[in-house]
């Protein structure tokens, strides 16, 4: 559907606040089956289904695979997926080398994913992350990129989407290059791009590396529609006044020192905490100015991470209340709609992991719309 900028803002805001997944539309083509590897709570699948819906097509999940049980439970509740469509698996131990004969351990993947047209994956990013000071760019988890090529060989989807942190290309194990070469050997045309997801409508600055593999010709990233200008207020202003009602809507309890630091920010109407108010270890020789900072109401948030409950992990203090973000607010800033189900989470750490590690659905929403428009899916 063709929409202008104002309509797009309203459409996406309605999607973000929806308590139920938008109903499918009568499809103008065959159903698009999805396999989602390293799925987490399902952000990529939710976005792909919505992107297809907006293009007049029906997409559905064939199989989601992850190792984190709470995330798979959230995905199942969100999408109403039965047990046959989710698998708690360590893909590194289940999937063989790209060119190996089919293993018995892979047969469930083959059966569930048969006929899937879209393969998506968000391999663990910790091994590539600039926040990882231990095994940065030389981490065995980085080799999981080759799982994507292996599953593409088994299932032969029409398109493959892989997202990861911006530093993935600097990996000393050449994970991205090896995956690209393997996909090209399978006759895919592979295109890459670093995308600030704020340009796709996410109300945060979150730069991600995106790989798209397609048959015949390459995907044209330049044709994606831009949705800049969305702010913290755009995403969470309607949530004011409901903090504290549930675990999902409750901010973490700060230490006395951090409570005092938040009070200082509000007393001085400041966004950044000066060095003299920081812990001694964070007063000099640091480049993390946003740490202990306050979000700006009329600007996008910084990248939302699993540390959104701690002001010492980034700029995560609410713009109008002396507290950190609630999981609900963090989810909104991640473009995770309200119909995504986190009600089974029993601990704040589970919510932080699921929300902070999620791929914002706006990414795959935009990519799937683009793939369909370019007749590549």
Image (cartoon, rainbow, N blue to C red):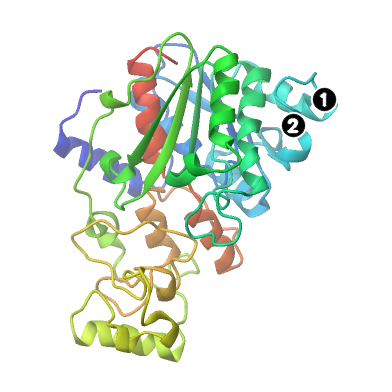
The location of residue 68, given as percent across then percent down, is 66, 51
Q: Is residue 110 left or right of residue 124?
A: right
Mark 1 or mark 2, earlier in chain: 2
Local packing at callout 1 (Cα closer than 10 Å; few below 14, some 14-19, many 20+) is: few
In the structure shown, which secondary structural element does the residue marked by tag 1 occupy? Answer: loop
The quarter holding residue 221 reads: top left
Q: Is residue 84 left or right of residue 173?
A: right
For residue 240, above or below residue 104: below
Residue found at the far top of this picture:
216
Which dot marks residue 222?
none
Residues 221 and 246: in front is 221
The quarter holding residue 62 reads: top right
The quarter holding residue 345 reads: bottom right
Residues 45 and 227: in front is 227
The residue positioned 42% from the left and 90% from the top of the image is 257
The residue positioned 65% from the left and 46% from the top of the image is 141
| Contact (Cβ within 8 Å) of mark 1 with mark 2 | yes
The residue positioned 61% from the left and 66% from the top of the image is 346
- In which quadrant will I find the C terminus? top left
* Residue beneath disc 2: 95
Which dot marks residue 103?
1
The location of residue 15, given as percent across then percent down, is 33, 42
For residue 75, above or below residue 222: below
C-alpha distance separating marks 1 and 2:
7 Å
In the structure shown, which secondary structural element does the residue marked by tag 2 occupy? Answer: loop
Residues 88 and 97: in front is 97
Local packing at callout 2 (Cα closer than 10 Å; few below 14, some 14-19, many 20+) is: many
């Amino acid at each position: 559907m063709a929409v202008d900028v104002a309509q797009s803002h309203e459409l996406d805001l309605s999607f973000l606040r929806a308590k139920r997944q938008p109903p499918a539309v009568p499809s103008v083509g065959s159903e698009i089956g999805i396999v989602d590897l390293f799925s987490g709570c399902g952000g990529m699948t939710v976005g792909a289904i919505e992107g297809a819906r907006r293009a007049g097509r029906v997409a559905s999940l064939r199989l989601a695979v992850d190792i984190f049980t709470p995330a798979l439970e959230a995905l199942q509740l969100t999408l109403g997926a039965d047990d046959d469509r989710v698998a708690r698996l360590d893909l590194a131990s289940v999937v063989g080398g790209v060119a190996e004969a089919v293993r018995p351990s892979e047969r469930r993947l083959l059966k569930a994913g048969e006929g899937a047209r879209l393969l998506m994956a968000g391999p663990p990013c910790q091994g590539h992350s600039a926040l990882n000071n231990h095994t940065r760019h030389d981490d065995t988890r980085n080799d999981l990129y080759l799982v994507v090529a292996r599953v593409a060989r088994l299932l032969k989807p029409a398109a493959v989407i892989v997202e990861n942190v911006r530093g993935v290309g600097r990996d000393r194990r050449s994970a991205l290059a090896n995956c690209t070469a393997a996909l090209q050997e399978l006759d895919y045309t592979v295109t890459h791009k670093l995308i600030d997801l704020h340009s796709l409508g996410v109300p945060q600055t979150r730069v991600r590396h995106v790989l798209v593999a397609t048959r015949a010709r390459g995907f044209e990233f330049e044709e994606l529609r831009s949705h800049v200008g969305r702010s913290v207020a755009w995403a969470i202003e309607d949530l004011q006044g409901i903090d504290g009602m549930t675990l999902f809507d409750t901010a973490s309890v700060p230490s006395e020192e951090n409570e005092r630091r938040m009070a200082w920010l509000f007393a001085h109407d400041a966004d950044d905490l000066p060095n003299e108010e920081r812990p001694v270890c964070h007063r000099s020789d640091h480049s993390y100015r946003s740490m202990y900072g306050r979000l700006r109401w009329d600007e996008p948030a910084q990248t939302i991470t699993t540390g959104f409950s701690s002001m010492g992990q980034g700029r995560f203090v609410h713009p109008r209340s002396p507290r950190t973000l609630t999981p609900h607010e963090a989810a909104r800033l991640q473009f995770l709609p309200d119909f995504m189900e986190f009600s089974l989470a029993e601990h704040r750490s589970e919510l932080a992991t699921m929300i902070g590690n999620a791929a914002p659905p706006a990414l795959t929403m935009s990519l799937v719309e683009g793939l369909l428009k370019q007749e590549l899916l």
